[in-house]
């Protein structure tokens, strides 16, 4: 009778009480505790058979923590195998190119499936924990869609994004156009962040990068609005005025020479490649046409005509 019951328990599919059926195995939970939990949630008629089966198969100490999902009936051995493999439900977290450190922190804070550990902590402390050499994390996190098990900490997500950015930047720097005048990978990251904020058109990114590199080469100021907006911080209300262009901050490229001290956003891979493989051009100016594209010019006179046409509608 015992053998018959064992065979029945092993081969009879378990029917979840609902579909999908999600349950979470806590860190350090024993197989006996998991069996009792699944009994209480309606998966098992009694908990001892599953626990005994796990011990008999040598799986009692191999179950992994996480959130699991059953879409339909499953046998007890298959469920044990699922727990031992750590076949957990993953969550997707997508970060958009051009977003800032502040926006990343807010996005993680709003995600209920993420373990929050950085809220209220000084930014410098979090930056140090992530292993970022610079004082700011801006630019150092690669925007992408990441998959994690529920309960992952915000710091672990940020560490993964930072490691990804370091590798992408290092690979791009190693293969850079030798004519690019940038001195360090960090300068490339800063320029890439500006390119990311200036245009959403893939075809324009190398041209935009060439404008800023040409300006740096001849000693012109970059005079790019996105850096001014970044320097304004929370005071930016959606409009940029002449007084804002004149108000000096470390990121105001109208009042200061060269690149700003940090990136102004998290650039994507295309913007990084554009910064390190710019178009060959003599352009020093560009202005928005109003349809998402830009008009590029070689001289101030030509640029003023483009401004009159596309901005002033003259």
Image (tube, helix red, strand yellow):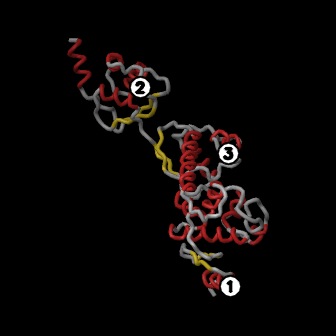
Residue where numbered disc 3 is placed? 133
State the SS at label 3: loop
Q: Is residue 92 visible?
A: yes
Marks 3,1: beta carbons within 8 A: no
Classify the position of the N terminus by image quarter: top left
Q: CA distance from mark 3 to mark 1?
A: 43 Å
Classify the position of the C terminus by image quarter: bottom right
Residue ranking furthest to the front: 178
Compare residues 68 and 97 and report the one nearer the observer. Answer: 97
Q: Position of residue 277 (x, y in %)?
A: 55, 64
Mark closer to the chain start, 1 or 2: 2
Marks 2,3: beta carbons within 8 A: no
Place residue 188 in its image quadrant.
bottom right
Residue where numbered disc 1 is placed? 301
Compare residues 18 and 135 and report the one nearer the observer. Answer: 135
Task: Name which residue lies at 47% across and 38% down.
Answer: 149
Classify mark 1: residues with Cα within 10 Å, few (<14), some (14-19) or many (20+).
few
Task: Name which residue lies at 44% across and 20% down.
Answer: 30
Q: Position of residue 33 (x, y in %)?
A: 43, 20
Residue ranking furthest to the bottom: 314
Mark closer to the chain start, 3 or 1: 3
Seen in the image, is 285 located left or right of residue 200? right
Task: Name which residue lies at 57% across and 53% down.
Answer: 169
Seen in the image, is 171 located left or right of residue 213? left
Which disc number belongs to residue 124?
A: none
């Amino acid at each position: 009778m015992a053998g018959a019951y064992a065979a029945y328990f092993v081969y009879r599919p378990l029917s979840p009480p609902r579909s999908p059926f999600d349950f979470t195995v806590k860190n350090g939970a024993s197989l006996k505790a998991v069996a009792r939990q699944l009994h209480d949630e309606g998966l098992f008629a009694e908990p001892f058979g599953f626990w005994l089966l796990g011990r008999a198969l040598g799986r009692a100490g191999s179950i992994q923590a996480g959130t699991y999902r059953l879409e339909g009936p499953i046998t007890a051995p298959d469920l044990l195998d699922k727990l031992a493999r750590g076949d957990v439900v993953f969550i997707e977290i997508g970060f958009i190119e051009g977003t800032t450190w502040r926006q990343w922190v807010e996005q993680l804070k709003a995600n209920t499936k993420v373990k929050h550990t950085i809220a209220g902590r000084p930014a410098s402390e979090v930056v140090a924990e992530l292993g970022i050499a610079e004082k700011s994390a801006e630019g150092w996190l690669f925007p992408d869609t990441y998959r994690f098990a529920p309960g992952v900490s915000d710091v672990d997500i940020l560490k993964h994004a930072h490691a990804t950015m370091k590798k992408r930047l290092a690979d791009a720097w190693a293969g850079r156009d030798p004519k690019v005048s940038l001195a360090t990978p960090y300068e490339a990251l800063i320029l890439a962040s500006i390119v990311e904020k200036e245009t959403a058109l893939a075809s324009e990114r190398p041209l935009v990068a060439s404008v800023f590199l040409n300006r740096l080469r001849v000693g012109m100021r970059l005079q790019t609005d996105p850096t001014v907006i970044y320097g304004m911080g929370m005071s930016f209300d959606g409009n940029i005025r002449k007084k804002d262009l004149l108000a000096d901050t470390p990121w105001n490229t109208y009042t200061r020479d060269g690149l700003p001290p940090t990136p102004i956003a998290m650039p994507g891979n295309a913007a990084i490649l554009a910064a390190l493989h710019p178009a060959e051009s003599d352009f020093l100016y560009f202005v928005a046409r109003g349809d998402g594209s830009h008009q590029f010019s070689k001289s101030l006179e030509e640029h003023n005509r483009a401004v009159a046409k596309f901005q002033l509608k003259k």
